[in-house]
Amino acid sequence: MTSPRAIVIGCSAGGLTALEVLLGGLDPRIPAAVLVCCHTGSSDVEILCELLARHTQLPVVEAGERAAARNGTVHVAPSGYHLLVEHDERFALSVDPKVNFSRPSIDVLFASAADAYGASLIGIVMTGANQDGACGLADIRRCGGLSIVQDPADAEVRTMPQAALDIAGADHCIPLAAIAPLLNRLCLS
């Protein structure tokens, strides 16, 4: 793997707490863009951004159409849209049909980020109640990126991380509390 330029994170049920722990542990000097897709069921992602901003020193923003993925910033997928990363590392939003019953879909974000970043991407699948993210994580691994999966035994809901392990495998399968320290080591060393 080359030096990480982006980190994509996917979660669903139990995801807010997991994101608070992970983002709260990230070093504010992290030199990568952080892209988050969380199934919230809410039509207003601003509330999620506000909640997450309370737990991290990194800026937390809603990803917007044609906005650039900025290093050291957490970009959250907006409600009701698939979030994609273009080759120029700018975002595109789509209202294409739901994938794995979800829009935004983790698989859609992960697959487009894998195409854009290749081997300089880290993909993370955490707690959740469906299989979204598993195929996208396989795409990341195929493109030379690094995969991290929350240990299903440690997850609030084990379905999503277990599906990721079954379909994509993982370079690291670790408890939630160990993910941010690993990212800090990978991105800052």
Image (spheres, rainbow, N blue to C red):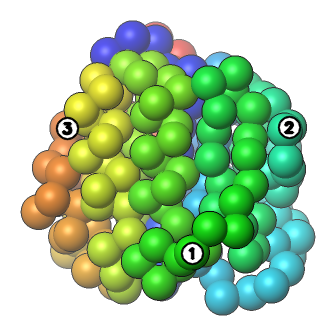
Q: CA gap, disc 1 to disc 2?
A: 23 Å
| Relative horizontal placement of residue 187, taking residue 128 as reference (left or right) | right
**Which percent across, then down, holds residue 117?**
50, 24
Q: Earlier in the sequence, mark 1 or mark 3?
A: 1
Q: Is any part of residue 55 visible from this angle?
A: no
Q: Which residue is mark 3?
A: 171
Disc 3 or disc 2, which is closer to the eye?
Answer: 2
Question: What SS does tag 2 mark?
Answer: loop
Q: Based on the displayed image, in which of its 4 quarters is residue 140 positioned?
A: top left
Q: Earlier in the sequence, mark 3 or mark 2?
A: 2
**Which percent across, then down, holds residue 48?**
77, 72
**Which percent across, then down, holds residue 159?**
26, 80
Which residue appears at 43% of the width and 34% of the height? 114
Q: Based on the displayed image, in which of its 4 quarters is residue 59 positioned?
A: top right
- Mark 3 is surrounded, within 10 Å at the Cα level, by few (under 14), some (14 to 19) or many (20 or more) other residues, namely few
Q: CA gap, disc 3 to disc 2?
A: 30 Å
Which residue appears at 42% of the width and 23% of the height? 118
Against 167, residue 155 (above or below) is below
Q: Amino acid at mark 2?
A: Ala
Q: Amino acid at mark 3?
A: Asp
Nearest the eye: 171 or 120: 120
Instruction: For the residues labelled 1 and 3, say whether their Cβ atoms are less than 8 Å apart.
Output: no
Give the number of the disc on residue 97: 1
Which residue appears at 54% of the width and 77% of the height? 98
Q: Which residue is mark 2?
A: 67
- Mark 1 is surrounded, within 10 Å at the Cα level, by few (under 14), some (14 to 19) or many (20 or more) other residues, namely few
